[in-house]
């Protein structure tokens, strides 16, 4: 990394502001209802924790871990559930939370997997969306920021084994 420059795309303050807006929007859309928020690990743990703290309706929180074969920067279509949710989502409103939607393979696979558990609705929230990279017909319901095709690091997103804890969103130029 020594020869690469860090370029900040979204500061911690910008991220906080956007999370407040998203939380308000979600709370309004689900007014009078309860939500099951499902955070996809590991990448969304930071975003999910910020987002749910800005949602004012009752939220149950669960986690689902996926893995995908392929190299580090590209998701392949071969998504696998490593650890499933524990809650019973039958007849409930589900919000799937992920860090970023790229090809869309991960989200599509998770949606199909959760549909089998008969929830009454499923929506999706991502902090970052890279629409130009999409391989499936899918658009997140809630988007923090829409971005071009750049490799993102920080705010839950890793580069190798590190950088998930960096509180802002950046890329290496
Ligand atoms: P998709 O299945 O939509 O192609 O990719 C989703 C997953 O790939 C994300 O949850 C994330 O783990 C990883 N990913 C996609 N784009 C990026 C990126 O720009 N940076 C990092 N660190 N991971 C990414
Ligand atoms: Mg991920």
Image (spheres, rainbow, N blue to C red):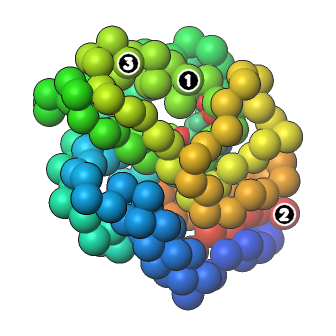
Q: Position of residue 109 (x, y in %)?
A: 50, 19
Q: Which residue is mark 2?
A: 173
The circle on residue 108 is 1
Instruction: Look at the numbered disc 1 and say if its residue's Cβ is closer than 8 Å to ligand 1.
Output: yes
The quadrant in which the C terminus is found is bottom right
Which circle's residue, 2 or 1, is located before the other in the chain? 1
Residue 86 or 35: which is nearer the viewer?
A: 35
Q: Is residue 86 above or below residue 26?
A: above
**Is there any visible trace of residue 82 in the rendered image?**
no
Numbered label attached to residue 161: none
Number of other residues with Cα within 10 Å of mark 2, as a class: few under 14, some 14 to 19, many 20 or more: few
Secondary structure of the residue carrying numbered label 2 = loop
* Residue 153 rendering spot, x and y as whole percentages: 62, 59
Q: Is residue 54 left or right of residue 107?
A: left
Q: CA distance from mark 3 to mark 2?
A: 39 Å
Q: Is 118 displayed left or right of 123 in the figure?
A: left
Task: Determine the residue positioned at 46% across, 24% down.
Answer: 111
Q: Earlier in the sequence, mark 3 or mark 1?
A: 1
Which tag is nearer the camera, tag 3 or tag 1? 3
């Amino acid at each position: 990394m020594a020869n690469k420059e860090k370029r900040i795309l979204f500061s911690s303050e910008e991220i906080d502001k956007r999370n407040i807006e998203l939380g308000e929007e979600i709370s309004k859309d689900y007014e009078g209802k309860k939500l099951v928020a499902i955070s996809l690990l590991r990448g969304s743990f930071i975003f999910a924790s910020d987002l749910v703290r800005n949602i004012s309706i009752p939220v149950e929180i669960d986690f689902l871990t996926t893995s995908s074969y392929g190299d580090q920067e590209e998701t392949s279509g071969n998504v696998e559930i490593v650890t499933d949710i524990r809650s019973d989502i039958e007849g409930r409103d589900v919000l799937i939370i992920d860090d970023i939607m790229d090809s869309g393979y991960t989200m599509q696979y998770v949606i199909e997997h959760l549909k089998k558990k008969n929830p009454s609705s499923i929506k999706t929230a991502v902090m970052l969306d890279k629409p130009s990279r999409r391989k499936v017909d899918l658009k997140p319901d809630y988007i923090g920021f829409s971005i071009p095709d750049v490799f993102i690091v920080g705010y839950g997103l890793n580069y190798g084994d590190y950088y998930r804890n960096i509180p802002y969103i950046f890329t290496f130029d």
